[in-house]
Amino acid sequence: MDVREGLLYTDDHEWLRVEGDTGVVGITAYAAEQLGDVVFVELPQVGRTLERAEAFGVVESVKAVSDLFAPVPGQVLEVNGELNAHPELIDSDPYGQGWIMRIRIADEGATTELKDAAAYRALIGA
Amino acid sequence: MRATALLERHRALGARMVEFAGWEMPLQYSGIVEEHRAVRGRAGVFDLSHMGELHVRGAEAGAALAYALVTDPPALAVRRAHYSMICAPDGGVIDDLIVYRLAADHFLVVANAGNAAVVADELRARLAGFDAALDDASLRTSLVAIQGPRAVGVLTPLTDVDLGALRYYAIAEGHVAGIPALVARTGYTGEDGFECFVDWEAGIPVFDALLAAGLPQGVIPAGLGARDTLRLEAGMPLYGNELGRDTTPFDAGLGRVVKLSKPGDFVGRAALAAAQERGRSKALVGLVVRGRGIARHGYPVFRAGSVEAVGSVTSGTQSPTLGEPIAMAYVPADATEAGTMLEIGIRESRVPAEVVPLPFYHRPA
């Protein structure tokens, strides 16, 4: 299972790549595989302010609906509009072209509550 | 949780297993969309051994079933089948069924896995007083299906049943891969295909033989996930979604199944005759979502601009064949005309959806 070093992870299978005071958020390869065949992504409004662990969007496969949860508190700066036409990018490239949003991190301390790659691997038994 | 004879096969094939109606069943192997497309374009092999197989035998087996069910099984020719339902006295649907006539005095009733025990109990009670006996063979029968346009080509060299002479909704006794089998030309996918009833352990070699013979033709194993998207595109009801105790066959648009013209009384007759007389208050329709979002079971349906929900989605998914979100829903009887625009409540949004004729998918002629 593909778990990337250098990213931070939630127990709900989102990843966060910290870039200065902003962060890019997506879902892990494990989450994408569990969902299977992603066919729809509901993205948050740009400008929306999110609490930590607040549901900010939805990823749907043929079979299942799965909420997305903010890994850290912050404001949505940008969303990956490509996913509207090509939700399958989440399956094919979950850590790259399948990114979901960029947020301004409101509280850098909140990142300490996230897992590193080793801890996330342990969580999913990878 | 029960497991079919094929559990180890499913695991070896890398299936994701889920609990379904008390059974540990494969949800998917390679992926729902890939399996769905395989069945539409080539064929897929399914383990359906969780289904209930109830044999009814006796001189009055036909008469007993005519009393117990809403259809008229004595009208079936031997080796033919029909779609049927067992209803409660109030007309609510207890289960939908396939009834096969194997001999003048022998019928096979196939029930949904989740209802098999209830149907067996009901049938046993309703058979009392008739010269007919129920034999619940569910736990000693494996059911392996091959569905899709290449099913006939894959099965032909494996069986002594004359598939060319086996019509849709017909059944024949013979062999598959040398194993005694009942082979029926029935299914739940909207494609041509066959269902093979064999002894429990024989499910393994039959499943293996179909997959091995189909492999060069692109035939793959298919799970319950694809079975659900396939039947939904084909506009076929699923018990628990489109059908239930609070639904009559008329509500579901399946009033033609109820043979009010058959002789004699049957369970539910008075209530069903009244329901037909009364006309429908709700009706099952097909919907295509015209906005962004996928309708799912239980989502509310609104008239355009209405505050109160007027209906409810029973099944919904992204259609792998059509590439758009499809759903079935119960709506008021005056909102069933094709082209009617309704709205579906998807989380915080109202998303437009258009009433379309069912089924969503017709197999090419």
Image (spheres, helix red, strand yellow):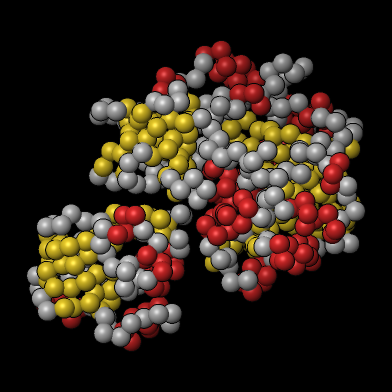
Q: Is residue A6 left or right of residue A87?
A: left
Rendering quarter of residue B192: top right
Left/right placement of residue B229 relative to residue B299 reads right
Question: Residue B81, image x and y in percent?
Answer: 77, 36
Q: Relative to B36, does residue B207 appear above or below in the rendering?
A: below
- Residue B355 in sight: yes
| Residue A61 drawn at (x, y percent) | 42, 57
Q: How many marks?
A: 0
Residue at 22 percent across and 65 percent down: it is: A101
- In the figure, B230 relative to B284: above or below? below
The image shows residue B12 at horizontal and vertical percentages of: 64, 74
* Observer able to see residue A11: no
Q: Residue at position x 58%, y 72% from top?
A: B14
Residue B85 appears in which quarter of the rendering? top right
Residue at the image point whose x is 38% and y is 47% from the top:
B294
Is residue B131 positioned above or below B120 on the image?
Answer: above
Which quarter of the figure is the N terminus of chain B placed in?
A: bottom right
Percent of width and height locating residue A12: 31, 69
Q: Quadrant of the C terminus of chain B?
A: top right
Left or right of B79? Residue A20 is left
The residue under the point 89% across, 62% down is B178
Outermost residue, top side:
B277
Q: Quadrant of residue B270?
A: top right
Q: Is residue A106 left or right of residue A95?
A: left
Closer to the camera, B253 or B185?
Answer: B185
